[in-house]
Image (tube, rainbow, N blue to C red):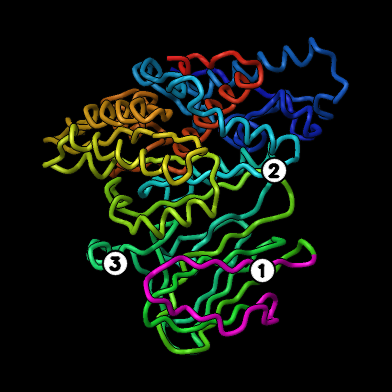
């Protein structure tokens, strides 16, 4: 089944106020999954009549529907796959996303920054899905800055747009192994810290910004650090010694917004752990933090030192916290979905206690399959795990996005991997870059439908359940 392409009207050049009526993902704007050869060269003017804007909104809705069928540059999709694809919605009680939608409105008016913390496994760590969402939201609501970045690279591919990171050879990534969780757990906001002890060890973060905030750990036996901005010492010999472990924060501001470099250097011997650096701009907009760890399970967050984590959460002050786990748990033969749901409920409760104003959103994992004989079959426990996630989210007053069902449920990842231009990788666990961009488009559109509904006071299809 070859689905016809729809073309788009360009509205990217609109003023901030006018763009509010036309939010749509970047893959629709240019060079993404769908072409736009029939757009007007000059776009739709700010003084376009109401009828033209209405027609454009109708076309946008049609394109969203087409995107679920016509992905990967109108790749051929068989009828069975098309039949299983659905237009996903965010589920939850009325008000579950209210705080985040209000934050988006403030960002859209240029009044404040809306912040998202997105926790998860390798689907998040790759920053493909989250990167696409970041671009879409910042394009429409403004760029609040690069957000939270680690002091080093836990993976060779770790990167953030516009950010350069450099670290000397003595820094060790902590928090990646199960043994470090048992022995320590004091890894802060991202669940990964970088530790060094020798004088002269340093790391740098360079990014377009007006201010940086360095997240550090004070602890018994701590050393001291000096913090430089663009090569000039701003804080000298800051002691990281303390009777017990506690989070420490150092904010350094520049006089102008430009490309700046923050450097942290050990100046006295002893343990120095950097939890990360928060990079912010003066402009209102969106900050989107991708906090994924390869191989992570939801239970990992419960094993972090909660006193340090909750301090970091309050400091970052998120408007939305997203939890996206489940792919790794689905492969655990001893998974007890009832117990899993209870632990997820406990985690959501703890997050709500740490930052009570933040909206919470649980995203179900994509389909995952294992090979049985010559066929790929969805892991049998995956649907029950998704149901447990939904129940836990509803119990906690959080929102829920069923990615498993949106893909088409059981068997969908095999269909995605078998496409002429695959949307899933051959491991039948991860998506391709195109697949992640498609899912990001779904999430973006679901968020925008909810946000627009919040402006009119009308419930977005399933948010009233």
Q: Position of residue 75 (x, y in %)?
A: 48, 28
At numbered mark 2, what does the secondary structure look like: helix, strand or loop? loop
Q: Of the numbered discs in the image, which one, if any, rests on residue 184? A: 3
Determine whether label 1 and label 3 are within 8 Å by CB.
Answer: no
Sequence-wise, the earlier of marks 2 and 3 is 2
Q: Is residue 248 magenta?
A: yes
Give the quadrant of residue 256.
bottom right
Residue 258 vertical placement versus 458 (above, below) = below
Q: Position of residue 63 (x, y in %)?
A: 59, 20
The residue indicated by pointer 2 is 112
Residue at x 48% of width, y 39% of height = 356
Question: Magenta segment, principal secondary structure?
Answer: strand
Magenta span of residues:
228-255
Residue at x 63% of width, y 79% of height = 235
Residue 171 appears in view:
no
Q: Is residue 177 magenta?
A: no
């Amino acid at each position: 089944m070859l689905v016809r392409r729809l073309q788009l009207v360009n509205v990217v050049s609109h003023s901030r106020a006018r763009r509010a009526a036309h939010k749509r993902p970047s893959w629709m704007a240019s060079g993404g999954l769908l072409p736009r050869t029939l757009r007007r060269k000059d776009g739709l003017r700010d003084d376009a009549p109401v009828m033209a804007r209405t027609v454009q909104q109708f076309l946008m809705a049609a394109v969203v529907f087409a995107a679920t069928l016509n992905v990967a540059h109108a790749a051929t999709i068989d009828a069975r796959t098309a039949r299983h694809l659905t237009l996903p919605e965010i589920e939850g009680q009325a008000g579950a996303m209210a705080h985040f939608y209000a934050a988006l409105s403030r960002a859209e008016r240029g009044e404040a920054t809306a912040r998202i913390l997105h926790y998860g496994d390798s689907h998040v760590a790759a920053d493909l899905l989250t990167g696409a969402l970041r671009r879409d939201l910042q394009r429409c609501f403004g760029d609040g800055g690069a957000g939270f970045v680690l002091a080093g690279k836990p993976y060779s591919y770790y990167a953030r747009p516009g950010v350069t990171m450099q670290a000397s050879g003595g820094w060790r990534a902590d928090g990646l192994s199960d043994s470090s969780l048992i022995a320590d757990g004091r890894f802060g906001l991202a669940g990964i810290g970088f530790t060094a002890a020798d004088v002269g060890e340093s790391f740098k973060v360079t990014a377009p910004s007006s201010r940086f905030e360095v997240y550090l750990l004070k602890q018994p036996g701590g050393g001291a650090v000096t913090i430089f901005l663009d090569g000039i010492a701003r804080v000298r010999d800051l002691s990281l010694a303390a009777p017990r472990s506690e989070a420490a924060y150092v904010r350094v501001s520049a006089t102008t917004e430009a490309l700046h470099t923050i450097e942290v250097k050990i100046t006295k011997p002893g343990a120095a752990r950097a939890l990360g650096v928060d990079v912010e701009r003066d402009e209102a907009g969106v900050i989107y933090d991708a906090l994924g760890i390869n191989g992570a399970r939801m239970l990992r967050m419960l094993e972090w030192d909660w006193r340090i984590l909750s301090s970091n959460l309050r400091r970052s002050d998120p408007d939305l916290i997203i939890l996206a786990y489940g792919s790794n748990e689905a492969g655990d033969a001893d998974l007890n979905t009832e117990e899993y749901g209870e632990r997820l409920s406990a985690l959501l409760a703890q997050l709500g206690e740490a930052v009570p104003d933040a909206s919470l959103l649980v995203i179900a994992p994509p389909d995952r399959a294992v090979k049985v004989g010559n066929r790929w079959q969805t892991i049998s426990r995956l649907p029950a795990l998704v149901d447990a996630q939904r129940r836990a989210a509803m119990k906690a007053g959080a929102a829920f996005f069923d990615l498993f069902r949106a893909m088409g449920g059981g068997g969908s990842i095999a269909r995605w991997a078998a496409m002429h231009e695959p949307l899933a990788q051959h491991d039948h666990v991860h998506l391709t870059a195109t697949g992640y961009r498609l899912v990001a488009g779904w999430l973006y559109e679901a968020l925008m439908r909810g946000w627009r509904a919040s402006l009119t006071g009308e419930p977005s299809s399933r948010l009233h359940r």
